[in-house]
Every structure is written in C-alpha cells, then in structure tokens.
Image: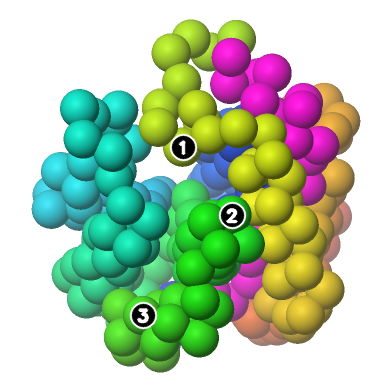
C-alpha cells in the first residue's frame, strides 16, 4: 500500500472526532503538510461504522436504540459487515492511490467492545476481523486514553446518548481495560495518548508522535529545507 492508515481509538467521549479534525488540519494546512507527499487523494477522514453508504445504514442499526434488543453476536457480525464493506470499497482503493487516511475506530474497537466489553470469544473476533480486513492493519493507532467517568460525562453533556454510550459504567471500564491491554501488547503500532489535557495539549502530543512516524515513512521529505524549521502547531 502506498498510503497510510492512521486510526484513532478510545472510550466514549475520549475526543477522537475533535482530534481527527485537528490532525487533518495540521496535515493539510499546518506544519505537517511538508511531511507528507503532495498530490494524489491527500488526507481523507472516515469512520467505523459508517464510512460507506451501506455502512451509514449499518451505523443506524448499531447505534440507535431500537424496540428489539440486539444480541451480542448480532452486534459483532454487523460491525464485521461494516468493516468488510469499508475495507474493500473505500480504504484499500484510497490507500492504493497514496491517501493518508484518518479513521475513527477500526479492529481494536471490536476487540475492546465486543471482546472485553461483551465477553465474546477472542478467537472468534480475531477470525472475523481477519475476514473483514483481508489482512489490512493500521500503520499507527492513536489510543486516546481517558478515565471512563470523564468520557461518559462528556457524552452526557452532548445530549441524547446512543446505544453504546448507554451501556453501564462497568461495561465501559472493561472496554478501557481492553484498549490498554491492546496497547501494551502491540507497542509497535499502538501509541497511548493522554487525552485528559486540553484539546491543544492532546493535539500537540499527537503531532509529536505523527512527526516521528511521518519522518520514518517519508524520510526524503523530512530533510527538505522547508520541513525542518517549522514548529508544530
């Protein structure tokens, strides 16, 4: 793949949406612009579930509170279906063209939410993730680490909670434990970011991590005269 897949993960209210937009701006309008190749599809933002037309319909099924309770296995399979469509119809074509893709959630969310949170079999989840992604993995995953109570308080201030946000605190604590276990097990691709600071502080930490990664991915660009003197912003 010529492009790069940058995934944001974290518990509810961790600030993924805000930080994705801040990183997009840094990569397109700020100092990060000089660290990525010019031309092509550029920087693209997407999400799971909901990154495709089919995914948008699946997102409503997954997150809206319906009359009939959704079984845990049905939930798992719907997330897998969304991911399969997203990978084949959206992510792989863009990455093949050289896009920098910023994705709100990917495979680690399934492990954390449906594995640690719901208690579904980890081997089954690994098999479904492998089928849905056909081997696609993130180039880096930024885990926005935030206490569950703080994140849930943020979601409550936003207004009506979706189906996942309405789960009890014990569920979200298990999800948090899952994300932390994944970060400890995969330090080569997962980087934990302290999401408890201000938006600017969190963005600065992300920019520092991404500067290091981009210099490794595109070393020729890192040593251009125009790239080195610009401070992070």
Mark 1 falls on what kind of element?
loop
Give the CA separation, mark 1 to mark 2: 11 Å
Q: Which of marks 3 and 2 is in front?
A: 2
Residue 128 numbered tag = 3
Q: Does the magenta stretch include residue 168?
A: no
The residue sitting at 69% across, 40% down in the picture is: 170
Q: Which of marks 1 and 2 is nearer the N terminus?
A: 2
The residue sitting at 36% across, 80% down in the picture is: 128
Depth order, front residue of 115/136: 115
Q: Earlier in the sequence, mark 3 or mark 2?
A: 2
- Residue topped by disc 2: 117
- Residue topped by disc 1: 164
Task: From the top left corner, tell me how far across and down residue 214 is, in percent.
Answer: 68, 71
Identify the magenta region: 137-156
Q: Would you say 72 lies left or right of 102 here?
A: left
Q: Is residue 209 visible?
A: yes
Decide: few, some or many residues near mark 2? Use Cα within 10 Å; few <14, some 14-19, many ≥20. Answer: many
Quarter of the picture containing the C terminus is top right
Task: From the top left corner, tell me how far across and down residue 151 is, in percent.
Answer: 70, 29
Hey, which quadrant is residue 93 in on the image? Answer: bottom left
């Amino acid at each position: 793949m010529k492009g790069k897949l940058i995934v944001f993960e974290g518990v509810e209210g961790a600030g993924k949406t805000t930080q994705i937009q801040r990183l997009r701006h840094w990569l397109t309008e700020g100092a990060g612009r000089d660290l990525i190749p010019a031309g092509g599809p550029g920087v693209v933002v997407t999400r799971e579930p909901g990154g495709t037309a089919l995914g948008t319909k699946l997102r409503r099924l997954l997150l809206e509170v319906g009359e009939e309770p959704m079984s845990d296995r049905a939930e798992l399979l719907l997330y897998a279906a969304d991911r399969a469509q997203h990978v084949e119809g959206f992510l792989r074509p863009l990455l093949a063209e050289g896009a920098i893709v910023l994705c709100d959630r990917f495979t680690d969310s399934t492990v954390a939410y449906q594995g640690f949170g719901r208690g579904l079999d980890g081997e089954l989840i690994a098999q479904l993730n492998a089928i849905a992604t056909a081997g696609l993995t993130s180039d880096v995953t930024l885990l926005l680490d935030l206490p569950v109570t703080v994140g849930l308080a943020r979601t409550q201030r936003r207004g009506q909670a979706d189906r996942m946000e309405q789960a009890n605190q014990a569920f979200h604590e298990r999800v948090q434990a899952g994300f932390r276990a994944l970060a400890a097990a995969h330090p080569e691709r997962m980087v934990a970011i302290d999401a408890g600071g201000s938006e600017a502080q969190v963005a600065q930490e992300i920019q520092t991590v991404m500067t290091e990664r981009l210099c490794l991915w595109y070393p020729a660009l890192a040593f251009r005269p125009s790239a080195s003197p610009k401070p992070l912003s």
